[in-house]
Structure formats: C-alpha cells, structure tokens
Image (spheres, rainbow, N blue to C red):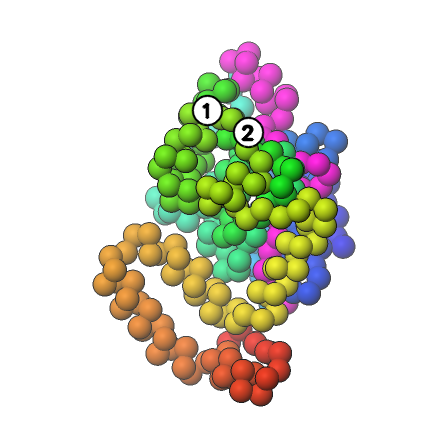
Amino acid sequence: MAEHQDVTYETDRRVATISFNHPEELNTWRPAMEMAMRAAMERAAADDEVRAIVLTGKGRAFCAGASLQALAQRAQGVSVLPPHDRRPGDLEQRYSYLLAIPKPIIAAINGGTAGVGFCLTLYCDIRFMAETAKLSTAFAQRGLVAEHASAWLLPRIVGPMHAADLLYSARRIDGCEAEKIGLARCLPTEGFLQAVQDYAAQIANHSSPRAVRLMKQQLWEAQHQTLAEATHWSEDEIVKCRDTEDYAEGSAHFLEKRAPNFTGR
C-alpha cells in the first residue's frame, strides 16, 4: 500500500481503493487533499491492472465538507474559494474529470458526508452508503447555493422533488433513506467497505473493461443526445465490438463455462 499525507492508495483484485486520510478531522476538505485525490485517480486511470476504483474515507467519515478553518474564514468574510478557472468543456470542470476517467468509480460512503464531500459522490458512477452513515447537502444552512453543479447532477439521480428537499432543507439522511430515494444503495455498516470492494472486484474481474469503458461514455453522452443519436451510436459501437478480443472472450468463457479472461482490447 502506497501512503500519501492526504489520501491512501491500495490495490487488490484489480480494484484501486482511494481513501481520504484525515480521520481525526472527519476527512474535511482541503486543497492538498483535492490534489492528492486527483493524482490518485489519474494513477488508477493509467494503470491497466486497475479496472475499478473505490472512493472512501478513513475512520468514521467519508468527507464532512469544508474544514473548520475554512468555515471560520468564511464567517469573517475571507474568501477561501480558488481562483476562477472556467473552461468550456463539460468534462473539464473542477470535479467533472471524474466522469471522464474510463473506469467505474464507486463511492463507499462509510460515514458523515456533507458539502463538497456530498458533491464528490455525485460524480461517482455508483454509490453505496452504510446504513448508519449520515449525509447532508449542508449548503442552505451555511448560506451557500448548491456547489459544484450539484443542482444539475442531483435531480438527474433522484428526481427534482427529492433534489429540492435535500438542497433546501439540508437535513441529514441515513443510508436507508438514501436507498429509498435512489441516491445510493444501502449496506450494513458491519463489513461495509469489504462488501463494496467485493462488488467492485466483481466488475473488475467479470466484466469486459472495454465494454464498461464505453458504457460509461454512453451513459454520460446520452444525457445530451436524442434517442435517435443514442441508437445510432450504440449500433456503430456494436459493429466495432465484434472485432475485439473481449467480444471473442465473452462468447468463449460463456460457452466453456469458465471465468472470463478479458484483456480490455
């Protein structure tokens, strides 16, 4: 396991687990942690042996939002926001690069989550939440609007009414309610991270990485396409699939009743 001051990075069964590593401060957000997470994500994206990524927090929190120091500075009228670096591309924004990583990113929401921590989970492909974990958008109770495009992402995940409820009230919900509204799948707190890693390993070792990579792209692009455009793209990609190693292996392992050995090509 490779350690970083702000995150840890470990791999097992073709799964990279990236963990926020300030448990004594509930993994509150800071610039160094943001940079460390991005470096870890880029490392996982570049590693052909990694086929799925789990994002979680050490200790009893996932990420409790802005640090107390940042909140104090805000209260004193001191700007703690980074300089505007506005770029035109949808996948070039501050956290939207997560959507462009060509591997599934699975949020393991193990404990307290709020503010920017909440936003980060929205950029993950799949979210699991421990039944006793607590999650809040927090913004309305801090005098802030919905940050980091959460007002765009959240309604697409849970629908407009649930999104308005979570944003306007900033109330805390647990894993059971998160599952009811479609925000996350709820798992028992005991053995939570192991269960999420097992799920990620299932994808990493039994699904074609090429297929998963392209399906992740399909899911994103479909939000901007017409039905006809999405249909035509899928038809074009199906033709390309038939000449790949993963397509041949997909048929072979099924017929031979054995575990797959996908290459990603």
Residue closer to the observer: 169 or 43: 169
Q: Is residue 35 visible?
A: no
Element marked by disc 2: loop
Q: Is residue 184 visible?
A: yes
- Alpha carbon distance from label 2 to label 1: 9 Å
Asked whether, in this view, residue 50 is left or right of residue 166, the answer is: right
Question: Which element carries disc 1, helix, strand or loop?
Answer: helix
For image coordinates 36% across by 75% down, the residue present is: 238
Question: Disc 1 marks which residue?
Answer: 169
Dot 2 and dot 1 residues touching (CB under 8 Å): no
- Residue 102 location (% of width, % of height): 50, 60
Whether the magenta-drawn stretch holds residue 65 is answered as: yes
Q: Amino acid under label 2? A: Arg
Is disc 2 surrounded by few (<14), some (14 to 19) or many (20+) residues within 10 Å? some
What residue sits right under mark 2 in the picture? 172
- Which x, y percent locates residue 181? 46, 41
Apparent side of residue 156 relative to residue 184 in the rendered image (left or right): left
**Quadrant containing the N terminus in the rendered view:** bottom right
Disc 1 crowd, CA 10 A, few/some/many (<14, 14-19, 20+): some
The amino acid beneath tag 1 is Ser
Residue 86 image-quadrant placement: top left
- Asked whether 259 or 124 is in front, the reply is 259
Q: Residue at x 49, y 26 (%)?
A: 170
Q: Tell me, for residue 254, which label it has, or none.
A: none
Percent from the top left, x then y, of residue 192?
68, 49
In the rendered structure, does residue 54 fall within the stretch colored magenta?
yes
Residue 253 position, x and y percent, is 56, 83
Image: 8 above or below 13: above
Q: In the rendered structure, which segment of residues is drawn in magenta?
A: 49-77
